[in-house]
Image (tube, rainbow, N blue to C red):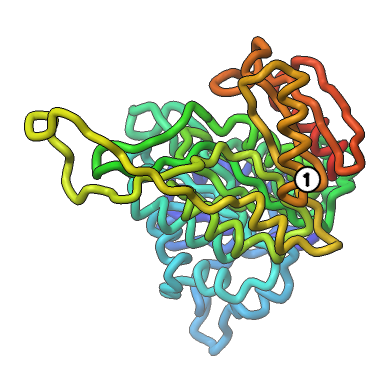
Amino acid sequence: MNIVLGITGSIAAYKACTLIRQFVKAGHEVQVVITPAGKEFVTPITLSALTSKPVVSEFFAQRDGSWHSHVALGQWADAMVIAPATASSIAKMAHGVADNMLITTYLSMKAPVFVAPAMDLDMYAHPTTQANLNQLRSYGNYIVEPGTGFLASHLEGKGRMEEPDEIFRQVMDVLQPEGCSNCSQEGRLVGRRVLITAGPTHESIDPARYIGNHSTGKMGFALAEAAAAEGAEVELIAGPVALSVKHPRIRRTDVVSAEQMHEAAMRLFPSCTDGILCAAVADYRPAQCADVKIKRETQAEMTLTLVQNPDIAAALGQVKTDGQRLVGFALETAASAEALHYGEDKLRRKNLDYIVVNSLCDAGAGFGVDTNKVTIVSANGQQQSLPLADKSEVAREIIRRCL
């Protein structure tokens, strides 16, 4: 395969040398496109020696009328990997600021694009950077999440560019899923697009308070990773959780309220082959949200009037086509037998193909823990009980048995 490797002006540019060696060793051709700032951190001579190709940096390399064609690079490449990607370059990519050879090559790229951010923790966490990364995700780019560690600023936090071997693995997982050692059953879900909801929803009472639940999103995120590992493209709709995605085939949409999750699910589900509704969506929300914080000094008692939120499972069940599969979740507080009865009823009412039932009565299952114990019920009445296990293992079994 032909790989365009973009390098921007970050101290992490030295890691690009190792990444080049991994691509070349695996039999791929690599063409480096580097920004002027990137050349301050790693020399074109080193990069050219590793790739056996001249490094591209400027539009016009000589004054004889010859020039580098970003369009030709976009047609030549099977993938573009930008590692490291600085906050500045990410912003330019998100908004089409084509002021250097790397950005024009990106804008001309017809192949998948992988972006490996590298910056200080506060720059990475800034709302502007996060909005730009979400914009790139919405364009279909794959974001290789940075790691947490010691940074060039001598601070420690998230922003450190992912290691070359992990970037290489994620790129190969997408481009060659059948050869991916991390993909079970040789990528049997290649070509499938799976919608997954995860985490809680928060329903605002006032600007400072909300109604919520104890969901951490761990089960839903584990399902997203398991589906992506088998080759599926995953649309993950996540409520407010403190989790990050790892697999580049996961595209994340963040929401807060049930209404926002409903809107995102209805928008994305028609383009998906499957849906797994794992989120703990609030059934009710306050009828009114106060514009300012409610003060206890001025209000001795408070009565909340609640109204029903949209039923996401029922709504998707109504629009589901014959070619789509829909899996729901039912968390109950009843004992197992009664929980299964509730789950079966929910499956029928909402036109689901499967429902995954678990009970808070089972130790180690439910919210805020790393394990789960579930029973999978199908529309034809078959039941498959799984023992208590780590949520990542449970997720793999759910994906294997339901999709």
User: What residue appears at the point 78 percent right and 36 percent down from the top-left corner?
Assistant: 344
Identify the image quadrant of the C terminus. top right
Q: In the image, is 103 to the left or to the right of 337?
A: left
Residue that sits furthest to the bottom in the current view: 65
Q: In this view, does 130 lie above or below 76?
A: above
Q: Is residue 125 above or below residue 371?
A: below
| In-image side of 62 versus 154 (left or right) | right
Image position, residue 92 (x, y; %): 42, 66
Q: Residue at x 67, y 33 (%)?
A: 330
Relative height, residue 269 to residue 119 (above, below): below
| Residue 24 shows in this picture | no
Q: What residue is disc 1 on?
A: 348
Q: Quadrant of residue 229?
A: top right
Q: Check disc 1 and report its element: helix, strand or loop.
A: helix
- State the residue at coordinates (80%, 64%): 321
Q: Identify the amino acid type marked 1.
A: Arg
Residue 206 x/y as whole percent? 25, 43
Q: How crowded is mark 1: few (under 14 residues within 10 Å), some or many (20 or more)?
A: some
**Closest to the observer: 54 or 8?**
8
Decide which of 386, 379 is in the foreground and name it.
Answer: 379
Image quadrant holding the N terminus, namely: bottom right
Looking at the rendered structure, the number of numbered marks drawn on it comes to 1
Q: Where is residue 332 in the image (x, y as percent from the top left)?
A: 64, 26
Give the residue at x 84% y 41%: 402
Q: Can residue 205 be seen in this view?
A: yes
Would residue 56 be found to the left or right of residue 378 on screen?
left
Horizontal and vertical percent position of residue 40: 42, 52
Residue placed most toward the observer, 89 or 340: 340
